[in-house]
Amino acid sequence: MAEVARATQRLADAGVPSPRHDAEELAAFVHETDRARLHLVADPDFDARYWEAIARREAREPLQHITGRAWFRYLELRVGPGVFVPRPETESVVGWAIDAVRAMDVAEPLVVDLCTGSGAIALALAQEVPRARVHAVELDGRAVEWARRNIDSIPEGTRVTLHQGDALAALPEFDGRVDLVISNPPYIPLGEWEYVAPEARDHDPQLALFSGEDGLDTIRGLERAAHRLLRPGGVVVVEHADSQGGQVPWLFPEDRGWADAADHPDLNNRPRFATARRVGH
C-alpha cells in the first residue's frame, strides 16, 4: 500500500498525532471498506478523493469531520462542524458512571447528562444500562441538531430525552430525584488557547472548550446544579483536564453536602474525572 505510506508521511510532516491510523482510516472511508481489508485495494485503484481527504487532514481538519462519524464505546455517532467530537478518554468516565448506576438498587435509574454535545455520554448510558431514563441537556443549537440525529439513530434513543437550555439551570422538575449527574463540560482556561490542538481550537465549538481564567467556572456551576438535582445517595461524575487533578474534588466539599469526593485516572493513568456522592436531605 504505497499510497497509504505516502499519505502517512504527509500527515506526519503536518504534525498529525496519529498519521498511520488516520491515513488508513481515510483510505477505508473513501473506498467503503474497513482497515482490515485495505490490502484488497490496489494502489492503481486508489480514488482521487483519497488525496482530497488527506489534504483536509493535513490542514488539521478533524478526521471525524472528514468521515462524518466518531466511534464512542459501542456507538457510531454522526459528527461535524458545530459539535464537539467525543474523545476516547471520555469512555473511561462513562465506564465508571455505568458501573456506579448498575450498583444502585434502582429499577429505572434517572440519569442527567449536562453539556451533552453529540449525545455520546447520554446514549452510551442508555445503551449499557437497559432500564435507565436519560435526560440530556445542551445549550448550543447546532450541537442540539447533531445530538437529535444521533438519538434518533439507535433504538435506545427512545429512552433519551433531549433538552435545549442552560445546563446549570436545567430540569428543575427533577430536583432531588436524580440518581446520576454526569458531564463533560468545557474546562480549558482561557489563557491556554494557543496550546490547544488545532483540531479542537479551530473546529470544536468554543462553548465546549473554554471556561474562565482557570477553566473551572462551568464545573463550579455544575456542583450547584448537581447538588440541586441529585437525591441523597446520588452521584455526580465530571470530566476535567489532567492538569486539574486534585483541584476538582475540592469543589465538592463536605460542608456543602458531599461525601467521597475523589479523582480517578484515565487509561494513561492521568487524573481525568472527579466523582462525589450527595448526602443530606
Image (cartoon, rainbow, N blue to C red):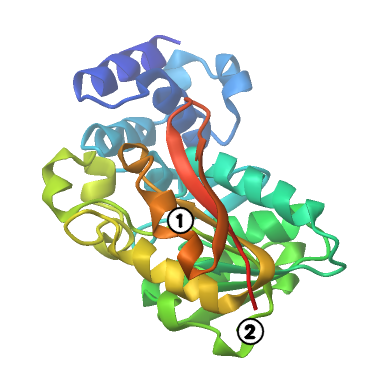
Whether residue 242 sits left or right of residue 29 in the image: it is left
Residue 210: image location, x then y, percent: 25, 58
**Res 132 quadrant in image:** bottom right
222, 15: nearer the viewer: 222
270, 144: nearer the viewer: 270
Question: Residue at (48%, 55%) from the top-left corner?
Answer: 238
Mark 2 belongs to which amino acid?
A: Phe
Q: Looking at the image, is 67 positioned above or below residue 210?
A: above
78, 32: nearer the viewer: 78
Q: Mark 2 vs mark 1: which is more N-terminal? A: 2
Residue 99: image location, x then y, percent: 73, 47
- Mark 2 lies on residue: 174
Question: Residue at (57%, 42%) from the top-left corner?
Answer: 91
- Mark 1 lies on residue: 184
Q: Looking at the image, is 136 positioned above or below residue 74?
A: below
> Going by the picture, which residue comes out furthest to the front?
255
